[in-house]
Each structure stands twice: as structure tokens, then as C-alpha cells.
Image: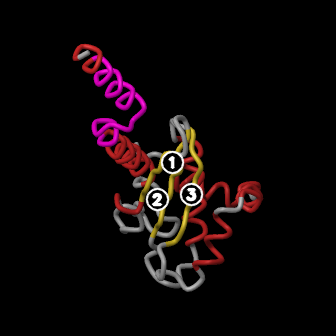
Amino acid sequence: MERVSGLLSWTLSRVLWLSGFSEQGAARQPRIMEEKALEVYDLIRTIRDPEKPNTLEELEVVTESCVEVQEINEEDYLVIIKFTPTVPHCSLATLIGLCLRVKLQRCLPFKHKLEIYISEGTHSTEEDINKQINDKERVAAAMENPNLREIVEQCVLEPD
């Protein structure tokens, strides 16, 4: 009986561990999300500002803490980015959001759903801009404009 109980206990702990419900699995999950968030941050930090010769990281438009990754299921992740324009009336905030979206759509090595927002209270028209940069049709239309596409390409180009 003791042997059966021990075997049952071992089997149950193994099943919980494999399914991610054990403490080890639960501890591993946040670490994986943190690693994915850093992977995202490494991609976006080098994006150039459309107006200045600086990166978004240098201007503190994006920081490590502005990136969050959540698991949707085993293969899909939700990537949430909240960026902060340099001034509350930044006329290029929509373009910065577009650059973030284009860079991540091209470069992220895992399946994802992407949500990009302006940090709450940091821009005078944040609601309108949030709608624009999360609307697939508007993003596609913007990227059809050759002048806009050229600016985005210059911003997302990796430094040598």
C-alpha cells in the first residue's frame, strides 16, 4: 500500500509539473515571459526617432518596463507595448507607433498578437492614436504611402 501511495504521489507530482501547475512550472512561466519581453525590448530599443538622430531607448520613449508579454496558449503570445512620447503634443506619436508595429511584425520570432498604446496621460490625443496604431486596415493603408513607408524603413533600419 505504501508503495502504491508513493507511486501515486510521484505520478501526480510529475503530471502537475508537466502541465505547469507545480511550483517549478509556475516559477518557470514568469521567467519565460520576462525573457520574451526582453527579446521584444531588444528589437524596439534601436528604432530611430523620426525627427531626431536618437533611438527610442535614448529618448526614453521605450523602456524595459513598457513591454509586457502574456501567454495566450502554448504557441501564441500577447505583446503589449506602452510607449511615452517625448512631449504631450508630439506630432509623430502615430508614426512611432507604426514603426514599433512594423519592426515587431517583421522580426519577432514567435507567434504573437500585438497591442501598442501610448502610456496613459502622456499625450493629448492618446485615444485616437491608440485606435489608429491598432487598426490593421489603417496600418496597411499607411504603409502603402511611399513617403511614409520610406520614413518607417529609415527608422526601423538596424544600425551598422
Q: Nearer the viewer, mark 1 or mark 3?
A: 3
**Contact, CB < 8 Å: mark 2 with mark 1?**
yes
Labelled disc at residue 157: 1
Amino acid type of the residue that numbered disc 2 sits on in the rendered structure: Arg
Give the mark nearer the N terminus: 2 vs 3.
2
Residue 144 in picture, x, y percent from top left:
76, 54
Secondary structure mostly taken by the magenta-highlighted segment of the chain? helix
Element under label 2?
Answer: loop
Q: Amino acid at mark 1?
A: Leu
72 to 52, vertically: above or below: above
Spatial CA distance of label 2 from label 3 is 9 Å
The residue beneath circle 3 is 99
Residue 26 lies, in percent from the top left, at 34, 42
- The segment highlighted magenta reads 7-27
Where is mark 2, residue-wise? 48
Q: Which mark is residue 14?
A: none
Is 121 left, or right, of 128 in this rendering?
left
Considering every residue shown, the one lying at the far left of the view is 2
Q: Residue at x 53, y 56 (%)?
A: 100
Label 3 packing within 10 angstroms: few (<14), some (14-19), many (20+): many
> Of residues 4 and 34, which is closer to you in this image?
4
User: Residue 137: which quarter of the image?
Assistant: bottom right
